[in-house]
Image (tube, helix red, strand yellow):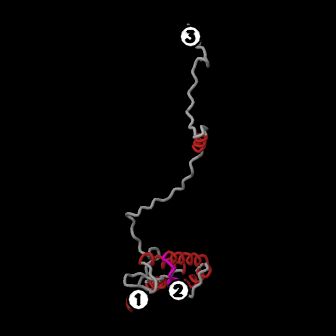
Amino acid sequence: MTRAAPTPPPSLLTAPPAPLPPLLAGPDGSGLAAEIEAYLASLPAPARRPVPYVCPHGTAVRPWCAGPPAPRATLRAGALRPPPRPVPVSAADHLRLASRYIGAHGWLQGAMWDARGRVCLLGAQAAVLAHGYGTPATVRTARVQLMEVLHATGRPAHSPDEYNDRPATREADVHRLLDRAAARAARLGL
């Protein structure tokens, strides 16, 4: 059996050195720009929080009263024609429904409602009550919560309606007030 001669190790002196990557030099001839870019490239990519994709096209329009059950007429109501029994809702739910009602029908100042269906804060509460959600006691409790939030946030008013009709008040302010009052009412179990 013949053996092949061992190959000698490559000599370091005979092989040319591998070319180094060119360094980017700044205006002063230093490689600072290249150093910074290399450092930034070595950092891990920032964590991206996934955001749900919301497509404005093709979404179904939901009615303002989606969620709570619709008021139903009782057997007695069918015979005597009184309004249907109100759906029991909490003060927090009443405030959320009022905010949705304003969002669906529009907001205005200086009147409870207009011919186009827009309503003020009081008009929205009256409309929610008229549609069969809650009782007058629910509306009173909700209005007390609105007043508490107004005074706690440094916007004292004689009534929520006065706040609604102030020239500086905008629709977003009314929605924010309703949201804060609903959160307060929910925290208190009202």
Secondary structure type for disc 1: helix
* Image coordinates for residue 40, horizontal then vertical, percent: 59, 45
Task: Pick out the residue farthest to the top.
Answer: 1
Asked if the residue under mark 1 is in contact with the one under mark 2, i.e. CB atoms within 8 Å, the reply is: no
* Image coordinates for residue 154, horizontal then vertical, percent: 61, 80
Q: Is residue 100 above or below residue 9?
A: below
In the rendered image, which residue does mark 2 sit on?
Answer: 162
Camera-side residue of 186 and 184: 184
Q: Residues within 10 Å of mark 2 (few under 14, many from 20)?
A: some
Q: Which badge, 3 or 1, is on the more N-terminal residue?
A: 3
Left or right of 98 on screen, residue 117? left
Marks 3, 2: nearer the viewer: 2
- Label 3 sits on what residue type? Ala
Q: Which badge, 3 or 2, is on the more N-terminal residue?
A: 3
Q: Is residue 18 visible?
A: yes
In the rendered image, which residue does mark 3 sit on?
Answer: 4
- Label 2 sits on what residue type? Glu
Q: Is residue 175 above or below residue 158?
A: above
Secondary structure type for disc 2: helix
Q: Is residue 85 visible?
A: no
Which residues make up the magenta segment? 162-171
- Label 1 sits on what residue type? Ala
Q: Is residue 166 covered in magenta?
A: yes
Q: Residue 77: which disc?
A: 1
Camera-side residue of 23 and 121: 23
